[in-house]
Amino acid sequence: MGRIFHWLGDPRDLKGQIIASLQRKLGASSFIHCFTEISSTVSLSLSVYMALQEKLDRFKKQQEKCQSTLVSTKAAQTLKSPSSSSTNGRVTPIPSVKFSNDTERLQHINSIRKAPVGAQMKRVIDLLFETRQALTPDQINQVCYVDMNANRNVFESMRKNPKIKYDGERFSYKSKHDVRDKKELLVLIRKFLEGIAVIDLKDSYPTVMEDLQALKAAGQIWLLSNFDSQEDIAYPNDPRVPIKVDDDLKLLFRGIELPRDMLDIERDLLKNGMKPATNTAKRRSTAQMEGIPASKSKPKKKNKEISKRTKLTNVHLPELFQNLKGD
């Protein structure tokens, strides 16, 4: 008890005199009880203060992390645009970004990182398709805000995607055909004598469609439509075989009237020593055995002729109705 009173103060000063007076009025036991209550209250207040201080420290660290993220994104954008990075040979310093002034950007980044895996993958694939560069996960995060290091589901899905190539460090877009310019495109088309679908070439590189039109205009390839799928097919035009067809031969070819029945066409092909690709007789017999009715051509509708019983509206033009049939 003496140690407690000694801690409370020296009886010779004012604080000690006040405490001694309280001790005489309350008694030793009551005074110790009051002192215990005060000590517990002070301890509780200290614990609450420490908890609040800890939360404040965490918030400050989070704020510093967000600010560093903003600075890195600003730096990436500055490096990406040469006009903003240097002026007359001098490097422009990166302006500091305040957390409170860029709340919308942080909300946008947060919404991207909380989006479904498929949506984040699409952003990364679009970025790799447009840039055609091999990028690390950190570089991807700086440009499109998809943090694959933190989201392992996105990382693994991108690594296993058939349109993406991963070399253990960088991600890049993988097209169906590995061509990068017009020369390589022409070499590839010449390997496919029976034609190659244009849809398989569209993702080769960004200007592939313009190069296809340029090769067509130069007479190096043909772009023809497939009647089955209505898709363009690129055929090589061999420059070693220049063929010019006379107009008379074109007219003769187009003037040949083919038989309407496939049986007659197949019979003519066999007469000329060519094997037809179809067998109409077998197909019709199979359909007849299975009870499938044969398709019959619809009879043509007869044109209705005007008679005297027809109600005429253009009576002011009698010359149109001179040859009316009487009933």
Image: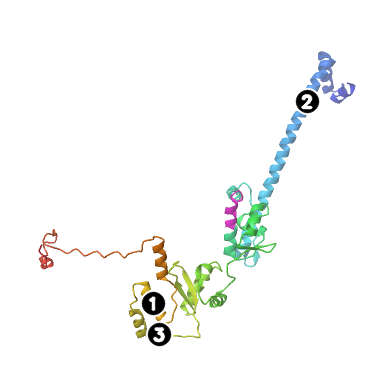
Q: Mark 3 — residue?
A: 245
- The CA span between labels 3 and 1 is 28 Å
- Would residue 92 be counted in the magenta stretch? no
Q: Residue at x 60, y 52 (%)?
A: 117
> As drawn, is 259 to the left or to the right of 97?
left
Q: Would you say the magenta stretch is mainly helix, strand or loop?
A: helix
| Callout 2: SS | helix
Residue 157 spot, x, y in % from top left: 63, 56
- The percent coordinates of residue 152 (x first, y second) are 67, 53
Question: Above or below — where is 184 with respect to 9?
Answer: below
Whole-percent x, y for residue 112 in the image: 59, 51
Disc 2 designates what residue? 40
**Residue 96: in sight, yes or no?**
no
Residue 114 magenta-highlighted:
yes
Q: Amino acid at mark 2?
A: Ser
* Front tag of 1 and 2: 1
- Mark 2 vs mark 3: which is more N-terminal? 2
Q: Which residues are magenta?
A: 112-123
Among the two numbered marks 1 and 2 on one chain, the one whose residue lies closer to the N terminus: 2
At label 1, which amino acid type do we have?
A: Arg
Q: Number of labelled discs?
A: 3
Work out which residue is located at the far front of the displayed protein and give it: 289
Q: Is residue 143 visible?
A: yes
**Dividing the picture into quarters, in which one does residue 170 lie?**
bottom right
Report which residue position mark 1 lands on: 267
Neighbours of disc 2 within 10 Å: few (<14), some (14-19), many (20+): few
